[in-house]
Image (tube, rainbow, N blue to C red):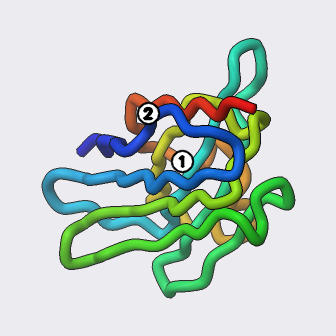
Amino acid sequence: VQPVESGGGSVQAGGSLRLSCAASGYTYSNCMGWFRQAPGKEREWVATIFSSGPTTYADSVKGRFTISEDNAKNTLYLQMNSLKPEDTAMYYCAASSGGSCYTSPWWVALYNYWGKGTQVTVSS
């Protein structure tokens, strides 16, 4: 099972994009998350949705980004509003089947399924 991201693109500062992440086949995960990686930087956590429904966000995107999922479609979303140039990065969808992601949703190593990413570019 590999997540497949889509919806990336180029947008001006202040604009919006919605990313989607589809997983083929059966997938059960305790946590589904979005991460991003800019050139020359480490991969950083953006947001996570837990299997029970609650969500959590990195401070840098709180109030601007919204993570959600459609279980019937096996699809994860990231609605990104008020985009800034510093949001420019490759965005990755990831799933964690372990239980430790409940306490450390930001920890990259806890996610065992990763997509190949979708590029988001925000111009000033």
Q: Where is residue 47 drawn, in percent x and y?
A: 64, 60
Q: Tell me: 17 left or right of 57.
A: left
Q: Quadrant of the C terminus?
A: top right
Instruction: From this view, report whether residue 69 is shown above or below residue 34.
Output: below
Q: Where is residue 57 drawn, in percent x and y?
A: 73, 65
In the current view of this chain or complex, which residue is farthest to the right?
59
- The residue labelled by disc 2 is 118
| Residue drawn 76% across the image and 13% down it | 40
Q: Nearer the viewer, residue 55 or 78?
A: 78
Q: Tell me: 74 left or right of 20.
A: left
Q: Tell me: 27 left or right of 85.
A: left
Query: Callout 1: few (<14), some (14-19), or many (20+) C-alpha neighbours within 10 Å?
Result: many
Q: Look at the numbered disc 2 and give the secondary structure of its residue.
A: strand
| Residue drawn 47% across the image and 78% down it | 51
Query: Callout 2: few (<14), some (14-19), or many (20+) C-alpha neighbours within 10 Å?
Result: many
- The residue labelled by disc 1 is 111
Instruction: From this view, report whether residue 104 is shown above or below residue 69.
Output: above
Q: Look at the numbered disc 1 and give the secondary structure of its residue.
A: loop
| Residue drawn 69% across the image and 51% down it | 14
Residue type of the residue flagged with mark 1: Tyr
Q: Is residue 100 visible?
A: no
Residue type of the residue flagged with mark 2: Thr
Q: CA distance from mark 1 to mark 2?
A: 18 Å
Which of the two discs, 1 and 2, sits closer to the camera? Answer: 2
Q: Where is residue 101 drawn, in percent x and y?
A: 63, 62
Q: Where is residue 21 drawn, in percent x and y?
A: 35, 52
Q: Is residue 111 visible?
A: yes
Query: Reading the chain from its start, which is encountered first: label 1 or label 2?
Result: 1
In the current view of this chain or complex, which residue is farthest to the top?
40
